[in-house]
Amino acid sequence: MAKNDIKVALIGNPNTGKTSLFNQLTGLTQKVGNYPGVTVDKKKGTCKLSATQNAVITDLPGTYSINPTSIDESIVLKTLLKKDIKESPDVILVVADVENLKRNLLLFSQIKDLEIPTVLAINMVDQMNRKGISIDLTALKEELNTEVVLISARKNQGIKNVKDAIIKCHVAAKASPMCDANYKIDPEYFDKLKAINPNFSLYELWLMVTQKNFPAAISKKEKEQLLSFNKDVSRLKKYQHKETIYRYQEINKVLKKTYIVDKSKATDLRSKLDKVFTHRIFGYFIFLAVLLLIFQSIFDWSSLPMDLIDTTFAELSDFARNNLPMGILSDLIVEGIIPGIGGVIIFIPQIAILFLFIAVLEETGYMSRVVFLMDKIMRRFGMNGKSIIPLISGTACAIPAIMATRTISSWKERLITILVVPFTTCSARLPVYAILISLIIPNTKIFGFYNLQAFTLLMLYALGFVTAILAAYILQKTLKIKSNSFFVVEMPNYKLPSIKNVAFDVLEKTKAFVFGAGKIILALSVVLWFLASNGPKSYKNAAENVTNNIENSQLSAAELQQKIGSVKLENSYIGIMGKSIEPAIKPLGYDWKVGIALITSFAAREVFVGTLATIYSVEADDENTTTIKEKMRSEINPETGKKRFNFPAGMSLLVFYAFAMQCMATLAIVKRETKTWKWPLIQLFGMTGLAYICSLIVYQILS
Amino acid sequence: MNTIATLRKGEIGYISEGALEFIPLKLLEMGCLPGAEVELIQIAPLKDPLYICVNGSHLAIRKEAASQIQILKSEF
Ligand SMILES: Nc1nc2c(ncn2[C@@H]2O[C@H](COP(=O)(O)OP(=O)(O)OP(=O)(O)O)[C@@H](O)[C@H]2O)c(=O)[nH]1
Ligand SMILES: [Mg+2]
């Protein structure tokens, strides 16, 4: 960041289009969605305002006022209170929704009183005609004593005016309070407050008192003086109430002169749709139908592209085999890395369809209706209506889902949501489930039409949700945390999804999935391959020992080779490690190779297939390319002489992957969001312990 | 006593002036002001939360908060 860059912060009510404007200004593609609380962290980008002037723009979470009630909102307070002087904005760009200008101006009036140069961008002006709204812009500028611009972030209109206004406002650097509400309430009281440190605006000092949040420039003595104002809590509360009323009175005066709504022109789609979507009975049915539709589509639409990818990768393997020099390294590429990566790529169609549906739901405004429908139910399980958003988006990935809990103001409800989100079936489990299901569940139809394999997968998703809810119930009963639950949610207007936003969202998430998994698989394959093809003395002597053993003298040359291969693998470093944990996982029906795959899965679940592919490729020196699925199918359990991946072992593995906490990235995020290692460790041991016990029971009953 | 929670679906009321100190700050800031017109749009299936429109804001609030906020039903 250059020295003379203007620092601009985007502030406004939730869902007013701040991130949409941010994306237009900076060319980035941050997530946009039609419900309050999409952005929960700050994000910076640069923007060229004019030929000579650049700006650093910060996108912030939405908030209704500077008095925060949840984590995402408090990020705004911290930015405004100049906690860090280098970070404090030069110009504030307040983004307001044209349809609800009155409420949006409340926050604007608070920011004006902080005496920071402010530009007001009134967004979504493309909706003005439909809603019968007209604005006298010149008069509004005068009344508010600020640059005001009308924009449509979605349609890319008025963006140039925003840039000009920022420069103009920065140059003028005039910053006068809008109403100085506090002086009108009790001049004597507030004069005393102002006297503590006249370098700060009165409203800043007032915020320090009410929020107990102090900038670095406040001395210890001043801090004590400020805190003494905080003693009379009922008076504080009364003044905050009065202040809000006073602000609304001032805003009403301004809007009376400048803002007209002709209700007769307004078309009202919202109430008609709400009658259906929030209906007492249909509401739930529609929600259930939506979920089933998503699930069915994931299967129906993806089978064709998945077959295509499958054959492409088989051909790629063949091509590589025929063109690479013979040897163990090309074995690794042909039989380890390519199938491992292919085992993830093949799921792009399915997860992209899942991401598509989630993005569309988020863009239409339907999510908030689900929050409304589910609040009472979720509360019984110690959560909040808002918890449904993380639980749904957790089917894509637990990490953004855990971030999304920041909008939940009650700490207990938020913590419970964070703790149970990893039970929902995330996209990384899909590759594991799919290959195991195809091995142990016959590809037949039940009830004449429903595919049994698809049904099994549906049941696994259901298992995830039900476990999450039950775990929440138990946590609610056991966690001794006091926090008041408060719940207000704004219901956004219904909108047609913007194709651009949805496309970017799907693309971005799919890319993250593929590259994230791809990198880990590549690295792990190489490490595993090294560990599997090297070993201590017993490894080096394996060939000799096997050949000299008289028991083996009856074997044919090919059989002997195979025997040597497996003895070598068992005596390699990875084999020794695997063997040492084998006793622990044998009762669950796994051998040491599966054990290694379980361990590498703690980095990320989707490496399961790649790990097995690498291990098998080192063991068998066969020339004919068989797919990883066929290799798993033909793997024999030497003790029973039956298949390794038979029904009991397969079911036990499915259950293990459904419950176990096998994702380092999630643990790291939980640590960051809860600020201690306690909760991620509880998740790690609790979930994995549950997985172990359940898999044990499943295997012992079935076998 | 009439509160937002005693409104019937589709009914309109006006927040009474005396309610001020019982309105949580957050709701106040979102437009739930004394004197404002409140319409109860929808009641969730399990009778909670309530979906209201006040001062142009469409909000879902819990019954618990709604039953604290006194209203007048007579239309002027
Ligand atoms: N009609 C219309 N819709 C818009 C416009 N700008 C943004 N939107 C839509 O408004 C919704 C909210 O946009 P966001 O950019 O996510 O809003 P935000 O203020 O960042 O929201 P939070 O991060 O939740 O506070 C999305 O569905 C956008 O597509 C606009 O100019 N016109
Ligand atoms: Mg945003």
Image (spheres, helix red, strand yellow):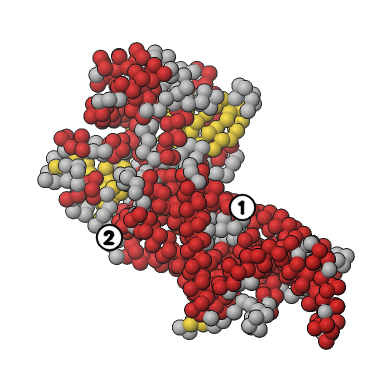
Task: Identify the amino acid type marked 1.
Answer: Ala
Say whether residue A405 is visible: yes
- Whether residue B20 sits left or right of residue A600 in the image: it is left
Point out residue A206 in the picture as x, y percentages from the top left corner. 34, 23
Nearest the eye: A286 or A153: A286
Nearer to us of marks 1 and 2 is 1
Residue drawn at x 36%, y 59% as measured from the top left: A473
Looking at the image, the residue that sits furthest to the bottom is A554
Asked if residue A598 is positioned above or below residue A98 in the image, the reply reads: below
Task: Identify the amino acid type marked 2.
Answer: Pro
Q: Residues within 10 Å of mark 1 (few under 14, many from 20)?
A: few
SS category of the residue bearing label 2? loop
Q: Which residue is mark 1?
A: A512
Asked if residue A506 is positioned above or below residue A434 in the image, the reply reads: above
Residues at badges 1 and 2 in contact (C-beta under 8 Å)?
no
Res B4 label: none
Point out residue A493 in the picture as x, y percentages from the top left corner. 38, 49
- Whether residue A110 sits left or right of residue A346 in the image: it is left
Q: Which residue is mark 2?
A: B45
Q: Residues within 10 Å of mark 2 (few under 14, many from 20)?
A: many
Badge 1 and badge 2 both on one subunit: no
SS category of the residue bearing label 1? helix
